[in-house]
Amino acid sequence: MEKLADTSLASYLEALGSKSPYPGGGGTAALAGALGASLGQMVGSLTVGKKKYAAVEEKMQAAVAKASALSKKLLGLVDRDAEVFAPLAKAYSLPKETKEERAYKDKVMEKCLRNAAAVPYEILKTLADVVPLISFFAENGSALALSDAGCGAALTAGAAKSAYLNVAINAKLMQDREYAYHLSTTSQRLCMAITEKCDDIYLKIAACYL
């Protein structure tokens, strides 16, 4: 499976729009999150070294470095999402004619579903770390790049919503309903917290241009 870093954007979009099972919503959520983190990082990069923002120079440099690391992590999760979905796609095709075959398929499916849900959940947790950085960039970064912080917030919110749906769809099919319920509700709360904060950042920035 070709890594995202080795493909062009055009190739990724072509594959995304095709009938291929991957890339899909989970990986694209990670990509949107990486874009959001990088937009925040850009605001910080445009701020570092400016005399006007000397008071936050040290914190700004640290935030830029952290945003860069989170963007790279999210980019890696694009590929990871495709890697864990491939076995799940194959598991759907396992035979289920006999009792033994059904039992084996159920076992394989449960494992694959857990793996497939774990990646978008990890995306959500990573996005939760992106949010305070975007907030910091919005409040302390160069005023000339304020709209970019807002764009970063919007992308991060969209990424969180997309990641949650990819947790939920896999959790819904799990036989271990207790585990599925915990995973789904935890992810939903995390998604709501991320989107609420991102929406607040976005609206405050949008109000500056009215």
Image: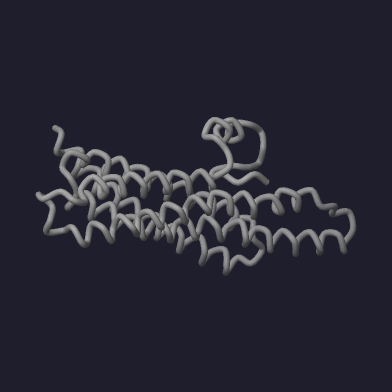
Residue lying at the far right of the rendered structure: 98
Image point (75%, 64%), residue name = 107
Colour scheme in use: one colour
Q: Nearer the viewer, residue 156 or 199?
A: 156
Q: Nearer the viewer, residue 36 or 166?
A: 36
Q: Nearer the viewer, residue 54 or 170?
A: 54
Q: Please tell me whether residue 176 is drawn above or below residue 61 in the rendered image.
A: below
Image point (38%, 54%), residue name = 68
* In this picture, residue 126 sits left or right of residue 140: right
Q: Position of residue 131 (x, y in %)?
A: 32, 55
* In this picture, residue 3 sits left or right of residue 132: right
Q: Nearer the viewer, residue 153 or 38?
A: 38
Image point (54%, 49%), residue name = 78
Image point (46%, 60%), residue name = 187
Q: Please tell me whether residue 6 is drawn above or below residue 178 in the rendered image.
A: above
For the C terminus, the quadrant is top left
* In this picture, residue 5 sits left or right of residue 35: right
Q: Position of residue 172 (x, y in %)?
A: 59, 55
